[in-house]
Image: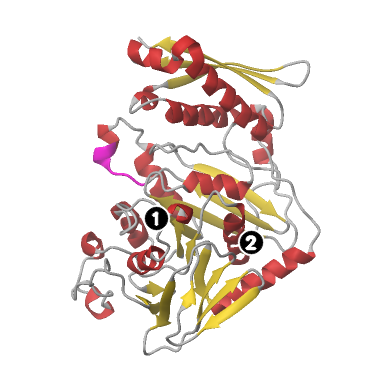
Amino acid sequence: MAFRVCARFFRDVSRRVVESAPQQSASWILTAGNAACSRGGRNGFIFTPACFITSEAFLNRLMKGKAAEADSSFYRLPASVLPDSGEQLSLLLRHPDQPDNSKILKVAIIGAPNAGKSTLSNQLLGRKVFAVSKKVHTTRSRALGVLTEEDTQIILLDTPGLTTVSKVKRHQLEKSLLIDPWNTVKEADLVVVMVDVADRWMSNRLDFEVLKCLAQHPDIPAILVLNKVDLVKAKERLLDITAELTCGMVNGRRMRVRPVIKPPWAEKRPEGDSLPNEDSAEHVDPLKALGSQHGWPHFKDVFMLSSVDREDVDTLKNYFMVAAKPGPWQYHSEVLTDQSPEEVCTNIIREKLLEYLPQEVPYSVTQAVELWQDTENGDLDISVKLSVKKDSHMKMVIGTAGQTVARIAREAGEDLSQVYLREVKLKLSVKLRK
């Protein structure tokens, strides 16, 4: 079975040699746009981000799917969230309007905090329904997004970043941060492991909690997504990171990644840090062995992308569409998320609080919806009370002459208008919690 390295555009280049293990005769192919250029044996090739490494058989299926998509003139606008709680609940309970040949895929997106999981989910859905912030633990509980196109429904299970009991206690976080990611993986047909490659501290090894999760569900297929490749200046690092995080194995096939000219900073791999030995694995407790393990050798495919790039995300979306299996839909095609409109609202407000308030302040703010009302001209009036612990926190939330809270209300209202498809007038008040 051959592997392929696929890419769509050229930005930065690095000359690398990617070859199969000596006992295999796999070839590697670089595809850019509609042009393909093959490099076999020990020849180098131009490598770019926004690509994925996959088997040739799966790539053929993917190409057939893209050809069918190009021939079709049908386009479905992204669904929206109904601003009325009762109507949203009624929509969630409606019988799925699936065709006879319906297909479905449940995808759990996991990773360390702030890897870009919610950003990816929003881009896949075409609307912003999950809070996104540069700070960790923006997503506080599991949320579900639904992407329906033609005969296929993709259910995105957006999870909080995997964390530990000690961190939850230290930062006074919800216990759902410990439970939800693990429960979500049990439901999934495919696990997406996201890694922020722009973070040098996190990109050299998978988070231990992620490894534990994968080890406890080895029967569920998993793919690796290297995110934020646009922020990596030395693009040659991407293949080194791939080799490290996959233990040199992709889809059960051994791979080697070597630079054509070895850079001076390249480290010699310790002899003891080799690929997993399957013969000795039987005598070792898998969870104990994870402590010294940097990657996961059972990924089916590897993607390198930027979750804020529309074309990159479309490639991953097409992958999901091809990977979907025949089966009944779980939701009506007009469903976008299982969140209530109020939950979407408070999540977006929390995103803005995390964006504009320092350190621990936004994590201690609680919200209460006081008004949710349609106006005569079709607008939506929302009033939310923000409660804070300290007087100093209240001053920070309000800001000089009320500028901070006004900015949060304005930007959150604009985002909500895109979700509810109507003008939203959001008013925020701040109160000291006794």
Give the percent coordinates (x, y) of residue 114: 40, 44
Residue at 58 percent across and 38 percent down: it is 129
Whichever of callouts 2 and 1 sits on the residue coming sooner in the sequence is: 1
Numbered badge on residue 345 = none
Give the percent coordinates (x, y) of residue 410: 58, 22
Q: How far is the residue under mark 2 from the one under mark 1? A: 35 Å
Q: Which residue in the protein does label 2 denote?
A: 327
Q: Secondary structure at mark 1?
A: loop
Decide if residue 301 is on the left or right side of residue 325. Answer: left
Q: Look at label 1 and name its amino acid.
A: Val
Does residue 388 appear in the picture of this structure? no
The image quadrant where one finds the C terminus is top left
Residue at 21 percent across and 63 percent down: it is 292
Numbered badge on residue 197 = 1
Q: Are marks 2 and 1 in contact (CB under 8 Å)?
A: no
Assess whether residue 341 is covered by the magenta stretch.
no
Give the percent coordinates (x, y) of residue 390: 33, 13
Does residue 109 appear in the picture of this structure? yes
Give the percent coordinates (x, y) of residue 216: 34, 60
Q: Look at label 2 and name its amino acid.
A: Gly
Q: Secondary structure at mark 2?
A: loop
Start and end of the magenta stretch? Answer: 162-167
